[in-house]
Image (cartoon, coloured by chain):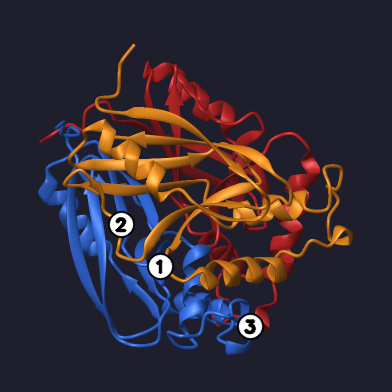
Chain colours: A orange, B red, C blue
Amino acid sequence: MVEAYGCVNVELEILVEGAGLYDLTQRVSGIVSSSGVDEGLVTIFVRHTSASLIIQENADPSVLDDLQAWMDRSVPQDAQLYAHRAEGPDDMPAHIRAAITSTSITIPVMDGRLALGTWQGIFLWEHRRGPKERKFIVSVH
Amino acid sequence: MVEAYGCVNVELEILVEGAGLYDLTQRVSGIVSSSGVDEGLVTIFVRHTSASLIIQENADPSVLDDLQAWMDRSVPQDAQLYAHRAEGPDDMPAHIRAAITSTSITIPVMDGRLALGTWQGIFLWEHRRGPKERKFIVSVH
Amino acid sequence: MVEAYGCVNVELEILVEGAGLYDLTQRVSGIVSSSGVDEGLVTIFVRHTSASLIIQENADPSVLDDLQAWMDRSVPQDAQLYAHRAEGPDDMPAHIRAAITSTSITIPVMDGRLALGTWQGIFLWEHRRGPKERKFIVSVH
């Protein structure tokens, strides 16, 4: 077995209440701090196909509302459009919404900190309606 | 020359018959196994601008059909919409479809295995109509 | 402090004149060359939420025009659609356009060079109308 040098994978969970954007920045930042890595990268990976990741503005909450509204218009929850309906009318749109955003995102670590821009936050985008426990992995490398 | 520690890049090919989703999970998993890496990451990169990568549900094939149908509606193959027509009416929509999905995806490797969620598969999404040989690179790091 | 082996993060800037695609390939390629890395990966990360990254065709400029035109149709600059208007009518569409493309992209480095396909270029996609100074980080690892 070969250990990839300096790669630390940590699995985390988040409880979501339904569709919307959930800020993961503090939790990812905490993993980076405790890793002791000074110069490197952090990768976030979500272990689901109906939730996804984006980096977006962390200041005005109306940005997040407008993102959700655009998605509701562009990938409608209209059962007539889809053959895959067994898991509910919000399931197939959730898969499409995940496909056009991201399952993994990589961010540089510089001087021991996430090198995000001033207005950037890391968000899990839940695309299903109901409460769920979602798993994601933070890898510092 | 500096060798990045533990990075193994392997170029692979897949023959596609036309537009649709092709499951790469077994092939990526095989590269991870033979690398001997226990804790790390794997990055998949597609060397084309009219095919792309997504992670999606690997269970019900109707999910893949619905993904394709949404793409056909949202990025139509209507030559009147595009100035770039020299390579056929399916070429420019293919570029757009690739742009709103992913050219590279990174997945953690834990305990020597791809840390995918239960329902996650890795797919190459071919956006052109005809048969082609597509190249992708699997990097274990 | 632990230095992640072989990770070199370099922050760069680009002056953009307004919405459109700006080719970063030569600058990324230069960083890879000067890093001395022979086998590895390069990650590009954009430090903004209204500009993004894609890999697209580097040959026919009409491809880039058609990409922009599709985005203008699919994420319209229509203030009535959005609650977040304080920063101008092009700001909220810019956030959505960034969300459905990419904030980070990872490309293999093989034989000391970017392992891009023949027709692939790396582009920053500016989604705001006016001139701006945009920051991105190139990480060779």
Q: Residues within 10 Å of mark 2 (few under 14, many from 20)?
A: many
Label 2, secondary structure: give it. Answer: loop
Q: Residues within 10 Å of mark 3 (few under 14, many from 20)?
A: some
Q: Residues within 10 Å of mark 1 (few under 14, many from 20)?
A: many
Residue at image position (57%, 35%) is B24
Which residue does the numbered mark 2 point to in the structure image? Answer: A116
Residue B90 location (% of width, % of height): 64, 66
User: Which residue appears farthest toward the right when viewing the image?
Assistant: A80
Give the chain letter at badge 2.
A
Distance from Cα at disc 1 to Cα at disc 2: 10 Å
Q: A34 or C79, which is in the foreground?
A: A34
Q: Are marks 1 and 2 on the same chain?
A: no
Which residue does the numbered mark 1 point to in the structure image? Answer: C49
Residue C43 location (% of width, % of height): 31, 49
Amino acid type assigned to the residue bearing label 2 in the image: Leu
Amino acid type assigned to the residue bearing label 3 in the image: Leu
Q: Is residue A115 left or right of residue A126?
A: left
Q: Are marks 1 and 2 in contact (CB under 8 Å)?
A: no
Residue A30, located in which quarter of the rendered image? Answer: top left
Residue at image position (22%, 28%) is B5
Distance from Cα at disc 1 to Cα at disc 3: 19 Å
Which residue does the numbered mark 3 point to in the structure image? Answer: C81
Amino acid type assigned to the residue bearing label 1 in the image: Thr
Residue A84 location (% of width, % of height): 83, 47
